[in-house]
């Protein structure tokens, strides 16, 4: 876990608290710090809204493995199948017309991530009501 990459002071404070426990914030026994409920589950994966969504998002979902995995090589075809079903569920339920799917993996120094536990981001930008254009969402790597 790396609180140094957080965009929000409140989120950074939460991560510092969690870091003191020595546990992963996305593992089941420590997921109590996340403020949003699980929306849907498929076998070993679940989807939730981000407690600290990126700026300019209409929706920012996290798709998280119930098993602690940190490296891309730990994923298998079943993982991708489950994630795909969760994305399909969200796009239908929330009538998502477009967005981005991102996965950071490996060392935080390369990824810019705050949590090493593998998770996908499903990001849908908001549309500016005045200009009818998409507001930019910044998703950093490194």
Image (cartoon, rainbow, N blue to C red):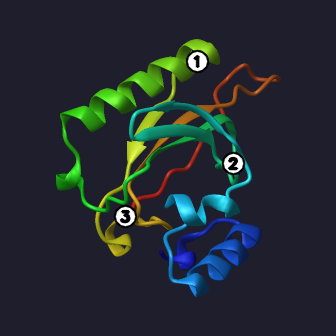
Residue 137 in which image quadrant? top right
Label 1 Cα neighbours within 10 Å, binned few <14 / some 14-19 / many ≥20: some
User: How far is mark 2 from mark 1, CA to CA?
Assistant: 18 Å
Q: Which residue is drawn at the image coordinates 76% and 23% (left, top)?
A: 131
The one nearer the camera, 27 or 106, is 27
| Mark 2, secondary structure of its residue | loop
Please state the horizontal and vertical placement of residue 142, each as a whole percent of the image.
38, 66
Q: Earlier in the sequence, mark 3 or mark 2?
A: 2
Q: Is residue 138 above or below residue 113?
A: above
**Closer mark to the observer between disc 2 and disc 1:** 1
User: How far is mark 1 from mark 3, CA to CA?
Assistant: 26 Å
Residue 4 in which image quadrant? bottom right
Q: Earlier in the sequence, mark 1 or mark 3?
A: 1
Residue at the outermost bottom position:
20
Q: Earlier in the sequence, mark 2 or mark 1?
A: 2
| Mark 1, secondary structure of its residue | loop
Left or right placement of residue 90 versus residue 37 in this view: left
Residue under numbered circle 2? 55
Left or right placement of residue 90 versus residue 140 in this view: right
Residue under numbered circle 3? 111
Residue 106 in which image quadrant? bottom left
Q: Which residue is drawn at the image coordinates 25% and 60% (left, top)?
A: 71
Q: Which residue is drawn at the image coordinates 62% and 15% (left, top)?
A: 93
């Amino acid at each position: 876990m790396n609180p140094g990459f957080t965009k929000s002071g409140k989120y950074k404070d939460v991560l510092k608290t969690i870091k003191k426990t020595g546990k992963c914030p996305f593992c089941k026994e420590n997921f109590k710090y996340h403020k949003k409920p699980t929306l849907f589950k498929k076998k070993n994966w679940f989807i939730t809204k981000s407690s600290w969504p990126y700026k300019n998002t209409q929706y920012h979902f996290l798709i998280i493995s119930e098993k602690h995995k940190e490296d891309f090589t730990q994923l298998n075809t079943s993982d991708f199948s489950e994630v795909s079903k969760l994305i399909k569920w969200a796009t239908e339920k929330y009538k998502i017309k477009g967005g981005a799917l991102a996965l950071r993996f490996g060392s935080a120094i390369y990824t810019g991530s705050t949590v090493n536990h593998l998770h996908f981001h499903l990001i849908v930008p908001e549309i500016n009501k005045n200009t009818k254009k998409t507001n930019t969402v910044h998703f950093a790597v490194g």
